[in-house]
Every structure is written in C-alpha cells, then in structure tokens.
Image (cartoon, coloured by chain):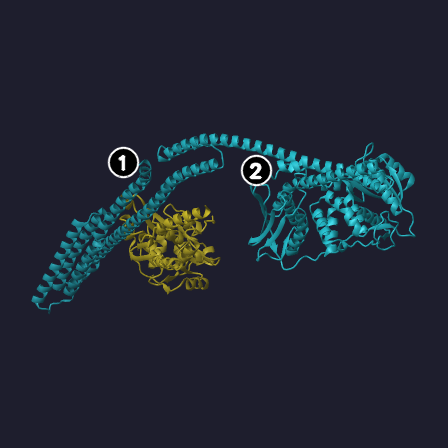
Chain colours: A yellow, B cyan
C-alpha cells in the first residue's frame, strides 16, 4: 500500500518538475542611459553588481539627463539617469515617473580658521563668483582683513568643480584668472593650511577645524553653513541629487539594482566617486 | 446489446477520453499561437531601426565628405556629392516613413516623430553649413555646425537609440511571451497526460474494486456455506450482472440448504438406527461376555467342590475295608464326577475363548513329529473299533513350522476322534495334510461314517449342539467342534464340513503357518514332587483363610503333610484375629469370604503393620482382579484350582525355605502295592497304552485318563500317582508336557 502511494507521489513530483518555467530573458535585461554625470558612478555600480551575479545582461550609455528621463518615460530604459530634478513638463507627460536619489553632491567653499575667526564666515553666491572671476581681490571687500585673496582653483574636469561651476559660476565657466590650479582635494587642504588668506573648494566632507567651510548667504540673507544636514536637506545651495528615474513599478532586476545602489556597498561607490551618500544620517544642527 | 458491466467499464474511461480531448485542443491552440508569434519575426522593429541607423550614417558620411570639399574641388564632384546626399536623405525619410507606418507602439511613433523632426532640422542646418562652407563662409559655417547642427544630430541619435531600446524591449518581451506559451503548452500536455493517466487508473481501480469486492463477498459467502453456514446470503445492489449473480447464488444456497436439511434428516435417522443397532450389538456382546465370565466363574466354582468329591472318592476307593457295593457306588460317583469335570473343562475352554482370554501361543516345532504322534495315538483307538486309519501328507509339507502346536494338535485329535466315534467298524478314517499355498496348512479328515444330515450341518459348530446320533451315544459334551472352530480361527484359518448321510463326512480346515528352519528348543519342565520340608528349619506357621471347608481342609492337610504348622480361619475377621494372636509367617487368603472379605482382612492386617506374607487365593483368572488383589496389600496370588507344586514353591519363594523332593529321598510308605518302580518313566508303558494316554491328555478327557489309570499303575505306579494328582488339579498342560517330554 505504501509502495503504491510512494509511486503516486513520485509520479506527481516528476510531473511538477517537468512543469517548471524557465527564467525569462527579459528578467535578466537592464538598460540604463542618461546623465553623463551619473554614468561613471553607475558603471562602477554595474561592475560591482555584476560581480555578485554575472548572468545579467546590463547595458549603459550616456545621453544626458533629459534623455534619461525621456527614455524612462517612453519605457525605452529600465532606469533613466538624471543629475537634475524632473521638471513639471516632464511630469505632465509621464505622471508615473519617480526619481530616486542615489547620491548627493555638495561643495564647501573653504578658508583658513584664522581668516574665518577674523570675520569672513559667510559669502553670497555672487560674492564667490566675483572672487573667482577676479572682481573681488581683497578680503577687505567682503568684511575681512586687508589682505589679498589667493584662489586655489581646481581643474575643470573635476566633479566638485563642475557642480561649483554649474551653481556658482553659471555659463561662463573658466578657471579663476589669477588663481592657482590644483588637481586634488588634498592640495586644496594643504594650500588653505599654509595660506591663511587662501580660498578653495572641496567636497564638503573634507572640512576640518582649521579648514572651515563658509556659510552661503541665500537670497533672504540667511547664512547656511555646509553641514551634512544642510546638504542632505538641500538648504545648502551648492548641492544636487544624482537620480535614478523609473516609470511606474521597476522590473525586479531594476529594483535589485536600485536597492544595491542604496546599499552601503553602493553608497561607498558613490563616496568613491566623490559624491555624498544619500543615506548618511543627518545628525548635525 | 451491450451488457451493463461492459457499459460500466466503458463509461469509466469516458471522462478520461473527454479530458484528453479538451487538453489536446488547448495544447493545439497554444501551439498555434506560439507558432504565429514565432512567424511574426520578433526582431522586425530592430531591423527597421538598424536600417534607419545605416541610412543616417551614410548621410552623415556624405556630409562629412562635402564639408571637407573646398573651392579647388571640381563643381561636378560637388554636384555629384550633393546629389548623393540628397538621395541618402530621401532614402532615410522613406525608411522613417515606412517604419512610421508599420509601427504600432505609440511610444515608438512619438519618438519617431521627434527623431524625424530633429533629423530634418539637422538636414536643413547641415545643408546650410555645407553651402556656407562651399561658398567660403567658414566661420559662419563652423558656428552653425557647433551650434544647431550638432545639437540636432546628437538629439536625433539619442532618440533613435531610445527607439532601438524600445524595440529591443518589445523583441525580448515577444521572445519571452513565446517561450512562456511554449512552456504552457508543454505543461498543459504533461499535466493533462498525467491527469488522464491518474484518472484512468482511478476509474479502472474503482471499477475493479467494485467487481472485486462483490466477487470477494460471493467467495466469502461461498466459503461460509462450504463450512456449513447455510443461512448466509450475499447482498449485492449494483444493478448489474453481479447482482443477478448474487441473486442466483442466494437461490442456489436456498435450494442447497433445503437439500442439505433433507439429507441431514435422512442421515440423522440412519445414524440413529445405526446407533441403536450398535447399542443392541454392544449389549448383546456385553451379555455374551457376561455369560462367558459367568460360565468361567461357575466352572471354577463347580470344579472346586468337584475336586473335593473326586479327591475324597479316590481316597475312599483306596480304602480296602470298603464293602464291594460301596466301592461300586463310589466308582460310579467317581466316574460321573470325572465326566462332569470333562464337561466343565470343555465349558471353561469355550468360555475362555468366548471371553477372549484365549490367544494363540506360537512356537517353532516339528510338524512331521506332531503328525506321527497323532497317527500313533489314534491308530490304537481305530484299531480297537476295527477302523482303517490312514494319515497322508504332501511332499511339499514343511517339516518345521511356527504356529500354536497344542491347539493344532487338539483340533486334529478332536476331528479324528469324532470321525472314529461316528464311523462304524470296518470303515475308513483318512487324514490328508497338504500345503496348497505358502503359509497355509490344509488338513482334511474324511470318514466313511453315518454322515450328518443337512439340517444338522448348519448348527454343527454351535456350542452344546449335538446331532441326534451324538445324543444317542451320550458321549461328548457338544463343545468339541465349537472349540475346534474357535481354535481354527485363532490359527487364522477356516473350517468347513462336507457330508452325505450314509456315505461319510469330511471336515477340512486351514491354518496359517510359517515354515521355519528349526524348532524352538524346549526346556525340560518336568516338575518334581515335593515330599516335605527339609529338616533343620524353624517351624513355619501358615494360616489358611477359606470359607469353604473342603478347600480349607484339603489345603490344610497338604500343608500339614509337608510339615507346616497350620491354623484355619473361616472368614476375614477370624483371619485378622488369628494373625494378631498367632502371628503366622504366611496367610493363604481366599478373597471371597463372608463377614469380612479377603480384601478387607488383608487391608486390616496391613494396617496393623503385621509382617506377614499374604498370598491371595482366587478363582478368577481376570487381570483386573489381580491388580485389585495386589493393590489391597497381598504379596502374591494363586489362581484356583491351584497346582500343588506351584503353591508350595510360592511358599518357598516367600519364606525362603527348602523342600525335600520325591526323587531326592527314599520313597515314603506308599499305599498302593505295586511293582517296585518309583521312577516316573513313561517309556515303561506299552506303546498302545501310551498313545491312548496321549490322546486322552490332548483332548483333555479326564474320564479317559481316569479309565487308563489302573492299566498305567500296573506298569508305573509313580506315573499313575502323578497322573492322578495332576488330574485332580486339572493340570492337563503338565500332563501333556509330562507325556511328551518323557517320551521324547
């Protein structure tokens, strides 16, 4: 009797095994395109992601944030990449679009502690732009001591520099005419430490006791210091989000990839690319 | 016309068939869809995109080429390149237009329109650049090129790539959908087939179970009925042949039950009548056995007083002072008593046979010698009656055989004496001994006598039946032939008679024998006569407890003669009292006594822990009684009528004493004056006398021996004495042994 039952169960099991559905080709496809800013970091994310599961077929190309948003909107892309916010006209076209920040960029304008204590604690965007263009050359012009300003400008290709340029300098992006060009954040820190009247830009995470980020005076006259909290909450103006854009529910693989980007590993890649983690707890102020 | 059960089985498979049909249809449908999708080239969209991509690449190359052309270049070449560009542009637009018409996806259409707009903008802008370039306005051309032209081109390419992405997604989705359909089809077929198989098995099982259970029920009922439970019925309600079968079965059982009941009644009746017959037979047998036992007991009981009568008659006869008339009367008493004893002996023999106490006592012996002895013995009697007596034997007769010699001898002697008795002088008596087949002896005794009337032949072998002639002769007891017949049966043979009145009679019988090579060695068992106790032994006290005075006195006298001190008790109570007072060494205890039986007395004596030997005296020869006697506490028992020597030897055995034997010592004072020869030597007898004696002994005829005694006494007084003693003790076996051994 038991033998008969066993044979029946085996028969059913074999039947069920025969009915297993093979994985769909579409399930292993992931297409990304869009922001040229996000693209290098996304490539790094893909590399790390593929190390964990190399069977997936993931393609990526640039094209700009607009293409990224449009591609997501037309369901051409699984994930669009955008280094800006989705604008209202785009939302009008594709109301199901979602933007998921995967990294944040923030730039601190730093000076020596000595100068900071001497009174240079907050500048407006325009004042900073004037300094960079060489329109302001003495700290006295901005309520500081009577000392000439030395600008340590970064190479134009740098990520930090490009944000700075985009927000502060606008369209006319050239290196400061009387500035000294440096290539790394370390150089910028050393320069500030050696020269009390120098000014430079670093990713805001580089601030120390001696190298202090200036507050940015907003339109209503409020000075906003470059704290992590202010960067995270967008109150500090020289920041932007690097976004993944999806239309409606993401595919399982897209979802996995987004979760990976938001994981500590993914966020570490964001940091490695010079950006801020979006999951850093805002614990200052 | 299909039978119900056929339809049942058929219908059991219909669901499976229908299911298979549906599943097959579904599978076909899915497969067709899958096939259609596959046919519909799922990469068609991508091909379109690629063609457009190729076309714009060609258009771009031509433009690049045109931009590199300068003033030096011939106008023909410029015109040619320009025409080439225009054709590429036209082709591109046609491709876009075709694609636009084919496309069904709204996103693709939207993007395609956007692409077309950008591309046309690029075309126009690029043509301006080329014209400016060709006309030498390089700076304006460059500005335009970097500005609007590249912007439109880049955007167009990005849009085209998005279209490609969408097409790729669609292609993959179609591919996956096809795969899924294919898998679905496969699954449906697999599950469908599996279900069909399971359903088929299930229904087949149910049908088989239905039939199987029903048949099992019938089988079970049949078994019960076979075991005798006819009230069993099968209850099948399946509305098919099985129910009909069950009903037929029940009907059959019902009929069978009626038949069996009728048959049982008959058998019961038969059994009852058989039982009654058996009971009647058992009762008859029991009655017959009781009769035999009664006769045996009676014979013993009769012989005991007869023993005394003959003994005392003999004693008186020896008294020389007796008057002649008394002597003659005593002789009559003696003769009549002897005849009575003959009769009793025959009755006893017959009773023993009927009570089943007689068995064949087989031994190896010389058959020739036996026949010779018989011839010699009977020749004398035949001669006396002037009858011609012949014994013939066949050549193949085995000399040594294994059977009961005594019984064979007695049968032959019986038949021959009868033949001689009933044959008038001058007649013939012939004994014909043959060995017709192995292990069978055939003996025929033929005479030329008076013959037996047919009406007598049937009853010839009945006990106590005598023919008219036999009764007239007043000879014999009427038991001879009955005993002979019983003996023949004991020897495994048959006896029959053939007779014609006035011409003669032939008695013929068979006996089962086994030829052997040599006779069983015979021991010399001649008993020696005990004279007295050996001198120098303490006086032994022997108590005789016996209610019948003659027996008591005889035994007491015998014991006193031997030299024992003897006291007598007439009942059990006296025996107990005397034992206490007198303290005998040995008690002869009759078991049947008034006041207190021998059993009771023995038990009482044993209870008083008296150290005394008790020998029971009993007339019974039955085994059962012997056990009772020994159980009562007796040391031994002696069957009446006892042999004097045996009785004395039992005393010697128990009291460990010695006797003086007759041949050990000088003869006592012997009453009869006779030749001075005390040796028991049968060879001293003349042959004729010896034969007569032997015949009488073998036929157990006391009267005949009694008649011969005076003659024997003339030749050998001790032998006559001894014979007389033995005769009184009815010890024919010893007599026969004495005669046979002495002679041989």
CB-based contact (under 8 Å), mark 1 and mark 2: no
Q: Earlier in the sequence, mark 1 or mark 2?
A: 1
* Number of other residues with Cα within 10 Å of mark 1, as a class: few under 14, some 14 to 19, many 20 or more: few
Query: Can the viewer see residue B612 in this picture?
Result: no
Q: Quadrant of residue A55?
A: bottom left
Q: Nearer the viewer, residue B305 or A83?
A: B305
Left or right placement of residue B706 versus residue A235 in this view: right
Left or right placement of residue B531 versus residue B393 in this view: right
Q: Quadrant of residue B351?
A: top right
* Chain for numbered disc 1: B
Figure quadrant of the C terminus of chain B: bottom right
* Chain for numbered disc 2: B
**Name of the residue lying farthest toward the bottom:** B72
**Name of the residue lying farthest toward the left:** B76
Q: Nearer the viewer, residue B318 or B274?
A: B318
| Residue A100 drawn at (x, y percent) | 36, 49
In the rendered image, the vertical position of residue B287 relative to residue B425, given as above or below? above
Residue B453 numbered mark, or none: 2
Query: Can the viewer see residue B341 in this picture?
Result: yes
In the rendered image, the vertical position of residue B414 relative to residue A214, given as above or below? above
Count how many numbered circles sit on residues in the image. 2
Residue under pointer 1: B1
Label 2's element? loop
| Residue B501 drawn at (x, y percent) | 56, 40
Q: Quadrant of residue B665?
A: bottom right
């Amino acid at each position: 009797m038991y033998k008969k039952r066993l044979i029946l169960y085996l028969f059913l099991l074999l039947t069920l095994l025969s009915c297993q559905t093979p994985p769909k080709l579409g399930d292993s496809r992931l297409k990304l395109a869009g922001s040229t800013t996000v693209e290098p970091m996304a490539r790094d994310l893909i590399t790390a992601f593929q190390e964990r599961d190399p069977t997936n077929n993931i393609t990526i190309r640039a094209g700009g944030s607009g293409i990224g948003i449009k591609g997501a909107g037309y369901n051409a892309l699984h994930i669009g990449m955008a280094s800006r916010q989705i604008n209202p006209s785009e939302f009008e076209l594709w109301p199901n679009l979602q933007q998921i920040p995967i990294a944040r960029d923030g730039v601190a304008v730093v000076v020596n502690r000595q100068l900071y204590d001497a009174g240079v604690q907050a500048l407006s965007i325009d004042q900073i732009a004037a300094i960079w263009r060489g329109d302001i050359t003495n700290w006295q012009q901005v309520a500081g001591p009577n000392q000439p300003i030395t600008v340590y400008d970064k190479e134009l290709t740098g990520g930090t520099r490009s944000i700075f340029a985009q927000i502060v300098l606008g369209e006319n992006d050239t290196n400061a005419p009387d500035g000294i060009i440096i290539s790394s954040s370390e150089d910028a820190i050393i320069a500030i430490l050696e020269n009390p009247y120098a000014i430079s830009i670093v990713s805001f995470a580089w601030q120390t006791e001696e190298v202090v980020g200036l507050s940015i005076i907003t339109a209503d006259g409020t000075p906003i210091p470059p704290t992590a909290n202010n960067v995270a909450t967008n109150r500090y103006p020289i920041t932007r989000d690097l976004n993944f854009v999806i239309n409606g529910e993401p595919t399982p693989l897209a979802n996995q990839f987004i979760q990976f980007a938001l994981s500590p590993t993914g966020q570490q890649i964001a940091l490695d690319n010079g950006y801020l983690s979006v999951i850093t707890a805002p614990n200052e102020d | 016309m299909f039978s119900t059960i056929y339809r049942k089985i058929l219908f059991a498979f219909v669901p499976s068939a229908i299911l298979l049909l549906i599943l097959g249809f579904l599978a076909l449908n899915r497969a067709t869809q899958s096939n259609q999708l596959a046919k519909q080239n799922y990469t068609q969209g991508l091909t379109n995109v690629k063609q457009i991509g190729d076309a714009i690449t060609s258009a771009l190359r031509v433009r690049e080429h045109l931009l590199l052309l300068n003033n030096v270049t011939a106008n023909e070449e410029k015109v040619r390149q320009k025409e080439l560009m225009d054709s590429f542009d036209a082709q591109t637009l046609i491709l876009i237009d075709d694609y636009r018409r084919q496309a069904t996806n709204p996103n693709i259409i939207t993007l395609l329109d956007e692409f077309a707009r950008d591309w046309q903008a690029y075309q126009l802008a690029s043509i301006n650049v080329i014209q400016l370039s060709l006309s030498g306005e390089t700076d304006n051309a460059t500005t335009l090129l970097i500005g609007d032209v590249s912007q439109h081109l880049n955007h167009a390419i990005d849009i085209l790539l998005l279209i490609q992405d969408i097409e790729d997604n669609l292609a993959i989705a179609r591919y996956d959908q096809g795969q899924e359909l294919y898998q679905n089809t496969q699954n449906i077929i697999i599950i469908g087939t599996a279900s069909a198989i399971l359903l088929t098995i299930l229904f087949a099982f149910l049908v088989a179970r239905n039939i199987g259970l029903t048949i099992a029920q019938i089988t079970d009922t049949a078994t019960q009925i076979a075991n005798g439970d006819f009230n069993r019925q099968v209850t099948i309600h399946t509305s098919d042949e099985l129910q009909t079968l069950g009903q037929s079965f029940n009907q059959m059982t019902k009929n069978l039950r009626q038949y069996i009941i009728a048959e049982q009644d008959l058998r019961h009746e038969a059994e009852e009548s058989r039982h009654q017959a058996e009971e009647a037979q058992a009762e008859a047998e029991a009655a017959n056995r009781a009769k035999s036992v009664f006769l045996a007991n009676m014979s013993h009981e009769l012989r005991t007083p007869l023993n005394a009568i003959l003994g005392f008659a003999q004693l008186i006869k020896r008294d020389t002072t007796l008057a002649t008339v008394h002597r003659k009367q005593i002789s009559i008493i003696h003769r009549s008593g002897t005849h009575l004893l003959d009769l009793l002996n025959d009755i006893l023999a017959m009773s023993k046979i009927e009570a089943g106490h007689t068995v064949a006592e087989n031994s190896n012996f010389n058959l020739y010698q036996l026949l010779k002895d018989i011839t010699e013995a009977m020749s004398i009697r035949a001669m006396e009656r002037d009858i011609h007596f012949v014994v013939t034997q066949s050549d193949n007769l085995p000399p040594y055989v294994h059977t009961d010699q005594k019984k064979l001898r007695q049968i032959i002697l019986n038949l021959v004496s009868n033949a001689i008795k009933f044959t008038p002088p001058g007649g013939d008596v012939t004994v014909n001994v043959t060995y017709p087949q192995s292990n069978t002896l055939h003996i025929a005794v033929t005479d030329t006598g008076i013959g037996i009337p047919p009406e007598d032949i049937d009853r010839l072998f009945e006990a106590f039946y005598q023919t008219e002639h036999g009764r007239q002769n007043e000879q014999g007891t009427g038991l001879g032939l009955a005993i002979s017949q019983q003996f023949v049966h004991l020897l495994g043979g048959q006896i029959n008679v053939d007779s014609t009145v006035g011409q003669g009679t032939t008695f013929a019988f068979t006996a089962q024998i086994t030829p052997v090579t040599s006779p069983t060695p015979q021991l010399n068992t001649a008993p020696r006569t005990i004279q007295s106790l050996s001198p120098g032994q303490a006086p032994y006290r022997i108590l005789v407890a016996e209610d019948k005075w003659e027996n008591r006195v005889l035994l007491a006298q015998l014991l006193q003669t031997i030299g024992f001190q003897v006291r007598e008790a007439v009942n059990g109570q006296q025996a107990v009292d005397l034992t206490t007072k007198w303290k005998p060494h040995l008690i002869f205890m009759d078991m049947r006594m008034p006041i207190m039986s021998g059993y009771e007395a023995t038990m009482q004596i044993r209870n008083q822990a008296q150290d005394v030997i008790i020998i029971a005296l009993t007339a019974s020869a039955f085994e059962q009684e012997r056990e009772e006697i020994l159980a009562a506490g007796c040391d031994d028992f002696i069957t009446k009528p006892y042999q004097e020597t045996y009785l004395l030897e039992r005393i010697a055995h128990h009291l460990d004493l010695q006797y003086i034997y007759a041949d050990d010592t000088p003869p006592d004072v012997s009453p009869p004056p006779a030749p001075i020869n005390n040796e028991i030597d049968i060879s001293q007898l003349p042959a004729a006398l010896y034969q007569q004696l032997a015949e009488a002994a073998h036929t157990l005829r006391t009267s005949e021996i009694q008649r011969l005694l005076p003659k024997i006494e003339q030749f050998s007084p001790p032998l006559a004495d001894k014979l007389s003693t033995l005769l009184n003790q009815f010890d024919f076996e010893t007599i026969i042994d004495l005669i046979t051994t002495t002679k041989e």
